[in-house]
Image (cartoon, rainbow, N blue to C red):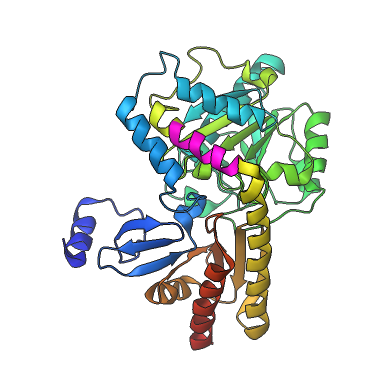
Amino acid sequence: MEIKKLLEESGHYIMNTYSRAPIVLRKGRGMKVWGTDGKEYLDFVGGVAVNILGHCHPKVVVAIQKQAQRLIHVSNLYHIEQQIKLAKLLVEHSFADKVFFCNSGAEANEAAIKLARKYAKEHAGKDKFEIITALNSFHGRTLATVTATGQEKFQKGFEPLMPGFRYAPFNDISSLKSLITENTCAVMLEPIQGEGGVKIPALDYFKKVRELCDKHNLLLILDEVQTGMGRTGKFFAYEHFGVAPDIMTLAKGLGSGVPIGAMLASDKVASAFIPGSHASTFGGNPLVCAAAIATIETLLEDGFLFDQCKRMGEYLRKELKGLQKEFPSVIIDVRGMGLLVGMEITRDCATIVKACMEKGLLLNCIAGNVLRFTPALIVQEKDIDHMIDILGNVLGSLS
């Protein structure tokens, strides 16, 4: 079907919830994707930090194929072998003792909010229900998680919002402390604010947050939906800051593109959930768990991809800072950790994204004026060089 017809039918049949680019992607391999018209694109969006092993990684593809031939879905009323193996892998490589599986980052954060409230009511008092999050945060699109999200633009039109959330400026421990009340049960933060513009805290910020939570008997929830699974150069971003949370959420890169989310917790906190407390029909089914197991096993092979992520992240930031020197009136800042990188500019970046796409490069615009780079962890210097060439040409034509 020709692209014009596909775009017409997309507009006719699909709800208008995305400002979609006028291309239809048909296949992908590694760092590249191809449209229905055969045009090739270098992908620095990576499914928005999802395709951490690149498109259609052979080990993940084979795992999905084998599992699809054996068993695709079975109810969580029964034990699931692949789910058990995946939970064990996550527990063995994190602070956590127990895992709950779901289908997305929003669902994982919803589960974390429910667990924190239930634990607090059982151990600290029935009035403990408030959760402090950060301004400019992003935690999802359900009614609870969009309320937890500290950005009014995502909440507009859905009022009245769910009660029980307060917002502190990110990386401001004094403001966070001032919001704690007798009703507070938890603090919920992203280690790095992704949708908020790739905002990175001071290295001692999370130690101070952890100390504050311990002092006031609060749970610390870390939303690692975007930062987890090696994205920052370590398995989980909290490892950079020398702290461990009580609850952590994952999704995006966990399954290399299949819809899977996870909420991890310590034994003490996880004990608040009993049969009937929470559930997910599709959560952790055999197919998605097989993909996630293959993803994690590939990540863990000699730790190569973690080192690759660190090296390529440093190279990417260096090259972007080179562009900053070339275009100082356009580029304000380059920041990031591992392969989660943002470049803040002086103008709306939608026109830059469009121009790059026309030249065969896929980029992502967030917070209005920040270009976000979330390529696969398999990215090579040659890919970064190619991206820089295209972006540099586009910036040159616009300046």
Tell me if residue 23 comes above or below residue 176 in the rendering: below
Residue at position x 30%, y 65% in the image: 23
**Residue 162 at x, y = what percent?**
52, 35
Q: Look at the magenta stretch and give its main secondary structure.
A: helix
Instruction: Based on the picture, tell me whether residue 294 belongs to the magenta stretch.
Output: yes
In this orientation, does residue 174 appear? yes
Q: Is residue 180 left or right of residue 263?
A: right
**Residue 339 at x, y = what percent?**
61, 57
- Residues 348 and 249: in front is 249
Q: Is residue 18 left or right of residue 216?
A: left
Q: Which residues are magenta?
A: 290-300
- Residues 180 and 228: in front is 228
In this orientation, does residue 257 appear? no
Tell me if residue 148 comes above or below residue 68 in the rendering: below
Tell me if residue 370 comes above or below residue 258 in the rendering: below
Instruction: Based on the picture, tell me whether residue 96 belongs to the magenta stretch.
Output: no
**Residue 206 at x, y = what percent?**
77, 43
Residue at position x 38%, y 24% in the image: 281
Residue at position x 70%, y 56% in the image: 200
Residue 350 appears in which quarter of the rendering?
Answer: bottom left
Residue 190 appears in which quarter of the rendering?
Answer: top right
